[in-house]
Amino acid sequence: MRPVLTTATCACSVLLGVTGALQGQRTELRLAGILWPAGRTVAHHDPVGGTVPTWAEATSTLRGAELVARGPGAGIMIRYSDGGFGAGAGDLSSGNVRSLEGVLLGGPRQFSIQAGYVRYSYVGLFEDGSESLFKGGVQSWVPLGPSGLTVHFAGAVRLRWGEEDPSGERLNLVGWDASTGVLYQAPRGLPFFIMFGYELTRHKPLPTSLPEPTLDGLETREELRGVFVRLGVRYVK
């Protein structure tokens, strides 16, 4: 009986804490442009047929936009970004990358769950294609009193569903992403804000134009990383 009572007490405490947090929440609408000077690293087997993986790096500035709308306990986030890497470089890292995300948010801003859909497209020298991924994780926005500063962190995993994966599994963990940053909005009621942060994304794309997607167990790996800047308007009521 004691374990049952202990479990029930913990569950009630969590529920009361979430309820109390939601009571203090307000409606938020945020629209921002994104500048992300990012580095892209791609690793794959030698396209000529060697057994040593080929590594290549390139840099570019991804540009995009983000829309966030949320009320007490729930919300939605839509984000789009694209950019070209290493134009004319002629290696694995050169090409265009495009991403479209739609995420549902649940819970208080201080600690909420995110779950949604990612459409990822890439066009490169040795591979190109697009794929649909599921995304799930957590995020947090913690205001630092009346300073106008808000600290943010987020982390999520990316899953691929379907029979197209070379491993034969229907549900596969193919990557993850993480970000952290600081947002500043003038405390005088002005709607403009600026945000600086760092984002890292690791992903295992699904090749579509290569005749042999793996070689001796080696697979394509991709990483995007860099400091981002977001500028926009934010209304909180």
Image (cartoon, helix red, strand yellow):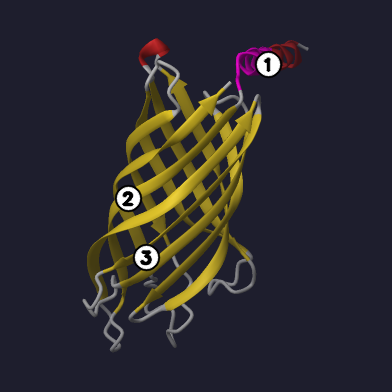
Q: Nearer the viewer, mark 2 or mark 3?
A: 2
Which quadrant of the figure contains the C terminus? top right
Residue visible at 43% across and 23% down? 190
Query: Number of callouts in the render?
Result: 3
Magenta stretch: give its range: 13-26
Residue visible at 43% across and 85% down? 212
Q: Earlier in the sequence, mark 1 or mark 2?
A: 1
Find disc 2 in the rendering and name its residue.
36
Helix, strand or loop under label 1: helix
Residue visible at 70% across and 11% down? 9
Q: Is residue 104 within the magenta segment?
A: no
Q: Which mark is residue 19?
A: 1
Helix, strand or loop under label 3: strand
Q: Nearer the viewer, mark 1 or mark 3?
A: 1
Which quadrant of the figure contains the N terminus? top right
Q: Please, what is the three-letter code of the amino acid marked with disc 2? A: Trp
Secondary structure character of the magenta stretch overall: helix
Q: Please, what is the three-letter code of the amino acid marked with disc 3? A: Arg
Q: Please, what is the three-letter code of the amino acid marked with disc 1? A: Thr
Going by the image, does 134 lie left or right of 226? right
Helix, strand or loop under label 2: strand
Most foreground residue, 138 or 198: 198
Q: Spatial distance from mark 2 to mark 3, Cα to Cα?
A: 20 Å
Quarter-of-image position of residue 163: bottom right
Q: Earlier in the sequence, mark 1 or mark 3?
A: 1
Q: Spatial distance from mark 1 to mark 2, Cα to Cα?
A: 36 Å
Q: Spatial distance from mark 1 to mark 3, Cα to Cα?
A: 42 Å
